[in-house]
Image (tube, grey):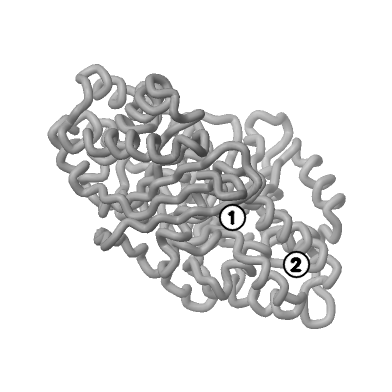
Amino acid sequence: MAIFQHSRLKNGVNLFVHPTKKFKTILVQLIFHRHLREEDVTSSALLPSVLERGSVNYPTRRQLAERLEELYGTELMADVSKKGERQMVTFSLDLVHDQYLPGESKLLRQALEILSDVVLNPLTEDDGFKADFVRQEKEQHEKVIKGLINDKMAYSVDRCLQAMCQNEPFGVFKYGTVERLKEIDASGLYRFYQRFLAESPLDLHITGDVDAAAVKSLADEVFAFERSKAEAVPPTDVKTAVADVRYVREELDVNQGKLVMGFRTGLSYADDDYFPLLVYNGILGAFPHSKLFQNVREKASLAYYAYSRLEKHKGLMVVSSGIEMKNYDQALDIIRKQVDDMVNADFSEEVFANTIVGLRNQFLVEEDSPGLMVNRALDGMLAGRHENTDELVKRLDNVTPEDVARVAGQVKLDTVYFLTGKGGAK
């Protein structure tokens, strides 16, 4: 069963229609793909906020907000994310389906026209964006970049991954750097925007109770802008070799230590063995019944939290924990033991069964969210894997404890990062 209908607009934009009668809303996502590069990731990340500041037809934020409110509270949002070594700049519209609004029949068209105006028809002056808009949004973006340090859990994970992948595109922060941000001006950003629009691979996803042919006709009309040949984004490089484990220690004014361990799995979502790896991660640290939670947090009382998660496109696994600084050696040892035990399938049948159930439920829950449906489709496109929920659950159900132990042998510790207090506290 097809999970979406794919076609191309006249200018080469990929259109993905996800027809479903489950929702009373329609989700529209316009997604630009960029290779993670130090030289332009900051400009890509800054663009959405500048574009949202004003367009030709909606020159102020207030006018744009008022127009969206007229369309029954339609929401327009922008987001920057990364999947593997790919930066995604996403503009989203969430609107009520007009079949539930008596007398309405053109709500989707009107919403798409607003999105088109914001993205394709920005407010400019002289040879660039409005200088005040760029200056103000640069100030806000600098706060976003610097603000990561305020969330010590996320900060420590990101710092571990940066150290682990320091010579790889994956090590580039999705929001860029303050140093690059300072170099950006209104005219330079506008020139970048023109290249960004013309060259970035671009997907338009529309999810809801819609007719694919009618949506294509509408999208062709609303998004009829010229594009050059899209610049291909290189595939993510999944590295497997680990020479020596890298140990990184950082001191900040913190009361709780953050121990993060980065592993290379050698497996990505494109591999059939990703599903045994998914179960492996579930048993190790994705659920309350997992080994990290039970043995590191509950029994040994060594961590305030302890979990593991996968980066499915880069083939990485991160184990993150919050610990008393004095417990560094003990926590490191017991976490390593949990990882080592996985190679010997040292887990109970009950834990294995509960993990399969938990992962199956995650797949099923994705069907109840338009955003998660699109995210799964995106993951599938990047990995060359187009499977519906039933097919994914079947793969999960075919995983055996022996499969889990086998992939566990491929998981190699690469980097240990420890965020500790100032003054030499371990």
Task: Specify the farthest residue to the left.
Answer: 402
- Residue neighbourhood size for the residue with mark 2, other residues' Cα within 10 Å, grouped as few (<14), some (14–19), many (≥20): many
Q: 218 or 191: nearer the eye?
A: 191
In the displayed structure, 46 sits above or below 396; it is below
Q: Position of residue 51 (x, y in %)?
A: 73, 62
Mark closest to the chain's N terminus, 2 or 1: 1
> Does 9 sit left or right of 238 as displayed?
right
In the displayed structure, 278 sits above or below 161; it is above
Mark 2: which amino acid? Pro
The residue indicated by pointer 1 is: 80
> Does 237 sit left or right of 272 as displayed?
right
In the displayed structure, 13 sits above or below 274; it is below
Mark 1: which amino acid? Val
The residue indicated by pointer 2 is: 122
Q: Position of residue 64 (x, y in %)?
A: 81, 51
- Element type at marker 2? loop
> Does 15 sit left or right of 97 as displayed?
left
- Element type at marker 1? strand
Q: Residue at x 17, y 31 (%)?
A: 345
- Residue neighbourhood size for the residue with mark 1, other residues' Cα within 10 Å, grouped as few (<14), some (14–19), many (≥20): some
In the displayed structure, 166 sits above or below 261; it is below
> Does 348 sit left or right of 46 as displayed?
left
The reply to whether residue 389 is visible in this rendering is: no
